[in-house]
Amino acid sequence: MKFKLLLVTLLLVWCSLTAQDRGGFSFFVAPAPALMNATPMSKGAASPKFLSGVGGVSFDQTALPADDLTVSKLTIAYNRTEEDGNRIVLKINDKNVTIPLYDWELVPIARYSDSPYYSCFTYFGNLADKELEKKVLDNDGHALNYHPGLQNTLLGIRIGYMDLLYMYPFTSDLPMKNGEYVLGAGEEVPDYDSNIQNRIKFQNLIGKIQFELDQQFRSYVICDYNQSIIFSVSEGELQLSGSPYYYCWRYAFDNPLFDQEERANKIETRYRELIDAKISENAYFSPRALYIDSLISVITRYNEQYADIETGDDLYPVITADNKEEKRSYLENFSNQSLYSTLINLTFMMESQKIEFLKEYSDQLSANQTILKGMNPAVWNATLKTMRYSAFFRYIKIHFPDTWQSFLEEIENVSIYPEYETPTVIFEENNELLQELFSNE
């Protein structure tokens, strides 16, 4: 059986179940948990559980001042009487600094920055109703989850579109309501033809990189992994550098050079040599204790980094046991041969799903900012602002906590427009089973 160790607390979004059509695909809004994952990319980059279970879009960097900027004093406030887009009152070293953020961007980004959670959006989410979730996932649908500060905001769906740009053609356009585009202040009606042309360029770019490197990624995370986000002041305006990075990855077994038989033999040889060494030290050595200790160690790593591999019912009680003593007690029921084969098999499954970071692939793809932005400028701009300003706000939170807390209180009850209900389910429009299921809800 497949199972996951749930590491997040569910925050239910109790909203009505409604449909939103997206050219060949359908979006629905169903009660769903918010995405509350506190793992930064620096720790999750090598974790199959993080990358395959959360993935999506995730930013965790903290901005740094430019080398020629020493920040000795900083204050930030919110002035409701000013025009939208000019309401942030920022002073650095007692000098006024403008920040061009509209309320529909500012409020969600500030809430996102202040939280302990880094993941913005995931395509591998959950629903509140587990039975409904199973029906969706078992029938080629997907559950979409958003950071609690981004769910049910226009910024949230913009970031969701960013993650889906590669997979769904409808993301070259923007959502509409009653035949009108849903736009935030400062946004323009999309140039759909231009977006499509850049989408074709993006697909060609992917093909070119794959051909030249002879590599293909399994998935990616749009993030700020190993990116420097620097802020400075120029002519009284805050300047931020750094752009989203496509962290492309695959499993070890995705590599054409991965030899299953060779890898399994190496694992078995490793354990055999360890046992032989113990026996050479003590002729009466029994490998049973070694099997159990090794399995407990492997299962601990499994729970920390994997926890989504098909393991079989026999091992389920060991995986879910609360402590080492319970694991050991259960494993004592296994025969020596079962312990040994389970140890070899589980170690092999974990090694075959080790993460391979495709750095050169990621670097080349991420360097083509013009094409990436061109696929949907509104989506790119929203993502870029979220990455940069969340990093800057984290800097303020860390180094000037009092003014940051005061700022949060000032924007706590700010209403943002336009309102937007973020969808939590997506599936192909011709999926009759799911269409019928949701039309009956």
Image (tube, rainbow, N blue to C red):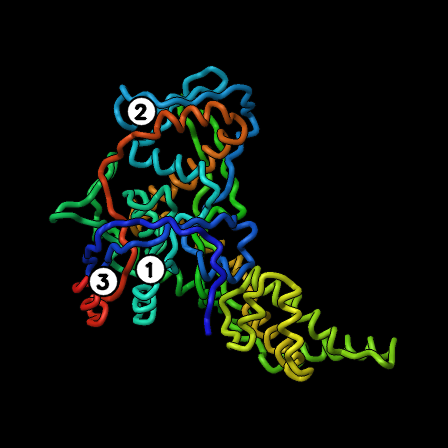
Rendered location of residue 211, percent (x, y) = 45, 68
- For label 2, the residue is 86
Between 102 and 1, the one lying in front of the other is 1
Between 339 and 254, the one lying in front of the other is 339
- For label 3, the residue is 25
Rendered location of residue 40, percent (x, y) = 52, 48
Judge the density around disc 1: few (<14), some (14-19), many (≥20) Cα neighbours within 10 Å. many
User: Which mark identifies residue 143?
Assistant: 1
Judge the density around disc 3: few (<14), some (14-19), many (≥20) Cα neighbours within 10 Å. some
- Looking at the image, is mark 2 or mark 1 earlier in the sequence? 2
- Looking at the image, is mark 3 or mark 2 earlier in the sequence? 3
From the viewer's perspective, is 355 left or right of 159? right
Mark 2 in CB contact with mark 1 (< 8 angstroms): no
Q: Amino acid at mark 2?
A: Asn
Secondary structure category for the residue under label 1? strand
- 199 vs 210: above or below: above
User: Which mark identifies residue 40?
Assistant: none
Q: Quadrant of residue 152?
A: top left
- 205 vs 315: above or below: above
Residue found at x 41% / y 40%: 112
Secondary structure category for the residue under label 2? loop
